[in-house]
Amino acid sequence: MPISSKIMPNSPEDPSSFNRSVVALAYDGLCTFEFGIAAEVFGLARPEMGEDWYRFSTAAVAPGRMHARGGIAITADCGLEALDSAGTIVVPGWSGIDAPVPQSLIERLVAAHSRGARLMSICSGATVLAATGLLDGKTVATHWRYSEALARRFPQVNVDASVLYIGDGRIFTSAGSSAGIDLLLHLVRCDFGAEKANAVARRLVMPAHREGGQAQYIERPVVPERGTLAPLLDAMRANLAGDHSISRLARAAAMSERTFLRRFREATGTTPGEWLINTRIDAARELLEQTRGSIDEISAAAGFGSVEALRHHFRRRFGISPATYRRNYLPGGPQVRADA
């Protein structure tokens, strides 16, 4: 079942015992949102947090004028030498999942890690950390769109496309852009405790911790349906609660059961049972997003025999309950009053 995070304990016994210097990288083609959330969490003045809050700065990967996404030209106050004294280094995305990583940056990151600094990446920034070799044999997170490409480029790294963020104490990686906020809040929680992390989350107007992993955001690929079974598949979709036993489906297709199963896999890439479950889940997902029917009504309309069956299969794919999914995605859902 997908989970939101995989994290080993990383809380210092004394909040004054860690290096508060946080340095974010700036590079040509900078991912503006990823950099912005790092600056928001670590760099924004927060007098209510006291004098022990983070000290934030930016290090340019290369000297001179750089460009950020959205037509912005930027320069940074510091160069890579800022990494030498950083307690935490943030890689806020990267210019491309296949873009080269400068050797000078690799060497600085390896040296920083060796002296005890924490390294963290957001989204495609996992490319930079993987290039250092420090992720070899480790499990990492990145955006689900980049997971296959990252695994191909760095086969010695285990890429987990199901989680929002993951870490082992001094190296942290996160999934897509907003999952970076989840990771940043986790770091605040580790360093300063849940109360201050919750305060930052409230100021960001977002939950301090999200349920579920990336599965709920992944666009399910449409597998082309080949052969002569398209009319039968359409009939199954139109009657998801009907009797779709193998024997009945084979008779409807005028085939032996053995031939039908082979042709079905050729047409859909899966078995009739899995196809039906996935189709029912997709129907339930659409109903949860677009209607206000009860979970019982949606379970029946999607062809599940019971609410328990819907919950089981929904959690297995998305890692959250149908009710939680609805709160996240029904238009106006989070803003609707409980007594409305």
Image: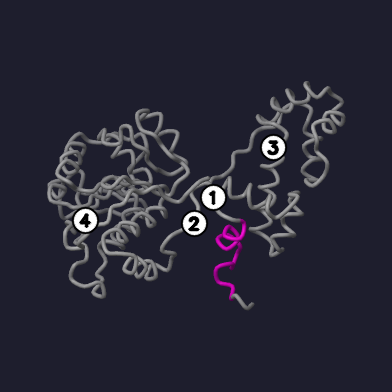
Question: Which residue does the numbered mark 1 point to in the structure image?
Answer: 319
Assess whether mark 4 and mark 3 are in contact (beta carbons under 8 angstroms).
no
Question: Which residue does the numbered mark 4 point to in the structure image?
Answer: 22
Query: Disc 3 to disc 4, how far (Cα)?
Result: 48 Å
Assess whether mark 2 and mark 1 are in contact (beta carbons under 8 angstroms).
yes
- Given the image, on which type of amino acid does mark 1 rest? Gly
* Residue 241, image x, y percentages: 79, 47
Residue for point 46% across, 58% down: 210
Q: Residues within 10 Å of mark 3 (few under 14, many from 20)?
A: some
Sequence-first tag of 2 and 4 = 4
Q: Single out the mark in the foreground, 2 or 3.
A: 2
Q: Single out the mark in the foreground, 2 or 4.
A: 2
Sequence-first tag of 1 and 2 = 2
Residue 175 counted in the magenta span: no
Q: Residues within 10 Å of mark 4 (few under 14, many from 20)?
A: many
Secondary structure state at the residue bearing disc 3: helix
Secondary structure state at the residue bearing disc 4: strand
- Given the image, on which type of amino acid does mark 3 rest? Trp
Question: Which residue does the numbered mark 3 point to in the structure image?
Answer: 275
Sequence-first tag of 3 and 4 = 4
* Residue 167, image x, y percentages: 33, 46
Query: Disc 1 to disc 3, how far (Cα)?
Result: 19 Å
Secondary structure state at the residue bearing disc 2: loop
Magenta highlight range: 322-337
Residue for point 75% across, 50% down: 305
Residue 274 picture quarter: top right
Q: Residues within 10 Å of mark 2 (few under 14, many from 20)?
A: some
Lateral position of residue 171 relative to residue 203, left or right: left
Assess whether mark 3 and mark 1 are in contact (beta carbons under 8 angstroms).
no
